[in-house]
Image (cartoon, helix red, strand yellow):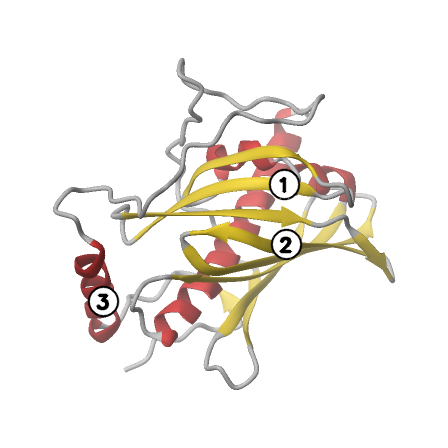
């Protein structure tokens, strides 16, 4: 039995028993006998480029992960993008956002606000700008129902604009995962609507089936673009 997804994302299908078993085995393999294992999550200094907006934080400077409802993934087109003959696939999801390109771009680049509205994000810290004009980021995301915290340091590279499409690609630097790739694409449809897509591949250092990782990357891309859409459209409704 395999987990399937239609090209238009709706309700998430239940995880088959075999894949659920894979999750349980992975959690057991990582377990140290205490809940909330973090696989050596580092504590980084609060470095930020000048002029960056600071996120909401607790008294000790740690960001707060807000409890967010599951994003509405209706109207989102998702597809798996095979990575050669490896058996792995990137998850790509696309949605039309009722908002200007400028508003969508601002939401995508509001990295330190991600824990407020992005699913599974625990922290996202801007460490500074790169010499090439990109963004140096540190992030933590939860997985396996909160049993594992995965972290990565990535560079969001300077945008490339071609044929009216803005592309923001990432470069994996370090982390307790094997690989993390993410590419945002923004395209203006008209003054009040934007086509947004995210292609993502996260490969943790866990003994998980490829089919499960592919399904989770596909689901993760859909939830991420849904969260950006909700962020932009709710902000616009509030300004009316």
Residue at 78% from the left image edge and 45% from the top image edge:
132
Q: Is residue 49 above or below residue 83?
A: above
Extreme left residue here?
Answer: 33
Q: Is 202 displayed left or right of 83 in the figure?
A: left
Q: Position of residue 8 (x, y in %)?
A: 53, 67
Say what secondary structure mark 1 lies in: strand
Q: Is 122 displayed left or right of 32 in the figure?
A: right
The alpha-carbon separation of the residues under discs 2 and 3 comes to 30 Å
Q: Position of residue 115 (x, y in %)?
A: 47, 35
Of labels 2 and 1, earlier in sequence is 1
Quarter the N terminus occupies: bottom left
State which quadrant residue 3 falls in: bottom left
Between residue 171 and residue 123, name the one nearer to us.
171
Q: Is 206 displayed left or right of 125 in the figure?
A: left
- Which disc, if any, is residue 238? none
Say what secondary structure mark 3 lies in: helix
Of labels 3 and 1, earlier in sequence is 3
Which residue is label 1 attached to?
136
Q: Is residue 192 above or below residue 201?
A: above
Q: Is residue 73 visible?
A: no
The alpha-carbon separation of the residues under discs 2 and 1 comes to 10 Å
Of labels 2 and 3, earlier in sequence is 3
- Which disc, if any, is residue 20? 3
- Which disc, if any, is residue 170? 2
Q: Is residue 102 visible?
A: yes
Of badges 3 and 1, nearer the viewer stands 1
Between residue 203 and residue 92, name the one nearer to us.
203
Residue at 19% from the left image edge and 61% from the top image edge:
29
Of badges 2 and 1, nearer the viewer stands 1
Q: Number of callouts in the render?
A: 3
């Amino acid at each position: 039995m395999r987990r399937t997804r239609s090209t238009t994302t709706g309700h998430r299908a239940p995880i088959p028993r075999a894949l659920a078993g894979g999750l349980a085995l992975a959690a057991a393999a990582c377990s140290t006998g205490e809940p909330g294992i973090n696989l050596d999550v580092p504590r980084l200094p609060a470095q930020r480029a000048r002029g960056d907006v600071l996120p909401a934080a607790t008294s000790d400077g740690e960001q707060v992960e807000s409890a967010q409802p599951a994003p509405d993934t209706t109207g989102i087109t998702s597809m798996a993008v095979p990575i050669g003959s490896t058996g792995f696939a990137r998850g790509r999801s696309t949605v039309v956002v009722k908002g200007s390109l400028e508003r969508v771009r601002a939401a995508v680049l509001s990295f330190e606000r991600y824990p407020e509205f992005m699913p599974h994000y625990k922290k996202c810290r801007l460490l500074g700008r790169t010499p090439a004009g990109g963004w140096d980021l540190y992030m933590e995301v939860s997985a396996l129902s909160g049993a594992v915290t995965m972290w990565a340091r990535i560079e969001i590279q300077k945008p490339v604009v071609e044929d009216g499409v803005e592309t923001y690609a990432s470069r994996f630097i370090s982390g307790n995962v094997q690989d993390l790739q993410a590419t945002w694409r923004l395209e203006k449809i008209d003054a009040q609507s934007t086509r947004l897509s995210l292609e993502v591949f996260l490969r943790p250092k866990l003994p998980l089936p490829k089919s499960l990782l592919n399904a989770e990357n596909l689901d993760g891309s859909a939830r991420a673009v849904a969260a950006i859409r909700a962020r932009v459209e709710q902000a616009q409704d509030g300004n009316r």
